[in-house]
Image (cartoon, grey):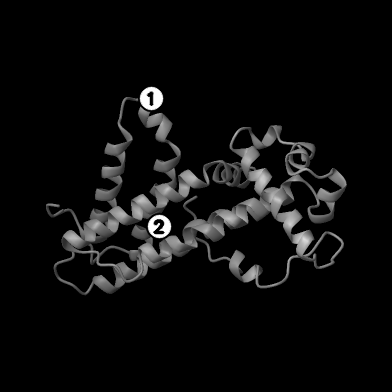
Amino acid sequence: MARTDTPSKTPRAARSAPLRAVDGRVPGRRGLATRKRLVECTIDLLASSSYRDLKVTDITRAAGTSPATFYQYFVDLESVLLAVAEQAVEDGQHLVDLIVGRPWSGAAGVTSAEALVDGFLDFYRSHRPTLRVVDLLSTEGDRRFRHLRVLILNGMTKALAAEMKAMQADDDIDTRHVNPAAMAGALIGLLPQMAGHQGGFEAWDIPFADVREAMIRLIYWGVTGPKIPRR
């Protein structure tokens, strides 16, 4: 999930246009409610089963509707998974606010790094099944999901690079000769990797609380240099 290509548009921009049914009609209030229920039931089912085992009939049964109704709003199973993924990306846009305008040096910088790590971990826990689907379908070559995977981290990477660039005139910052975009991409890219391997760390008898502390230090060191103040 560490690619940072500049996408053509964001889900937020895409959602400025009205949602349409498969036949091109703009659904009314009841139609939008039905579509929303189908998306929510898909999210619930992904939490308890693999997307490879998921069927349209499973979704419609959980939503209390029929496959015929499902196909009014979604062309296929991948289409509803795409809607689920777009919702996760939209929910993750607030993560940029944990970077922009925050102090990144001294003890306050450690607090900023901590807020960023905790914010991302909370986001990942809330959308874990969906983010796994995004990763899997991206790896399989589906460009729609690859585009969304980029969007999840692209804004955060650009924001952190901008903060680093603004700080590099400060002689107290030990990373002033580092490429801000490269460092930001590396730091932001580690977040989903660590969040997604919590079970692996615990299987190795590494407490995830210690992994969290390591993530905070790596973010701080990457932005400011090797020293870390007492907290």
Residue 173, image x, y percentages: 18, 65
Badge 2 density bin: few <14, some 14–19, many ≥20, Cα 10 Å: many
Residue 177, image x, y percentages: 24, 65
Residue at 79%, 38% in the rendered image: 57
Quadrant hosting residue 48:
top right
Image-based side of 80 in relation to 27, left or right: left
Residue at 68%, 48% in the rendered image: 81
- In this view, the residue in front, 120 or 34, is 34
Q: Is residue 10 visible?
A: no
Image-based side of 157 in relation to 171, left or right: right
As drawn, which residue projects farthest toward the left? 230
Q: Earlier in the sequence, mark 1 or mark 2?
A: 2
Residue 1, image x, y percentages: 50, 50
- In this view, the residue in front, 225 or 72, is 72
Badge 1 density bin: few <14, some 14–19, many ≥20, Cα 10 Å: few
The disc at residue 213 is: none
Which callout, 1 or 2, points to the residue nearer the camera? 1
Q: Is residue 163 visible?
A: yes
**Label 2 amino acid?**
Gly
Secondary structure under badge 1? helix
**Label 1 amino acid?**
Ala
| 53 over 110 or under it: above or below | above
Residue at 81%, 49% in the rendered image: 70
Secondary structure under badge 2? helix
| 34 over 12 or under it: above or below | above
Q: Which residue is mark 1?
A: 203
**C-alpha span from label 1 to label 2:** 28 Å
Quadrant hosting residue 211:
top left
Image-based side of 33 in relation to 184, left or right: right
The disc at residue 185 is: 2
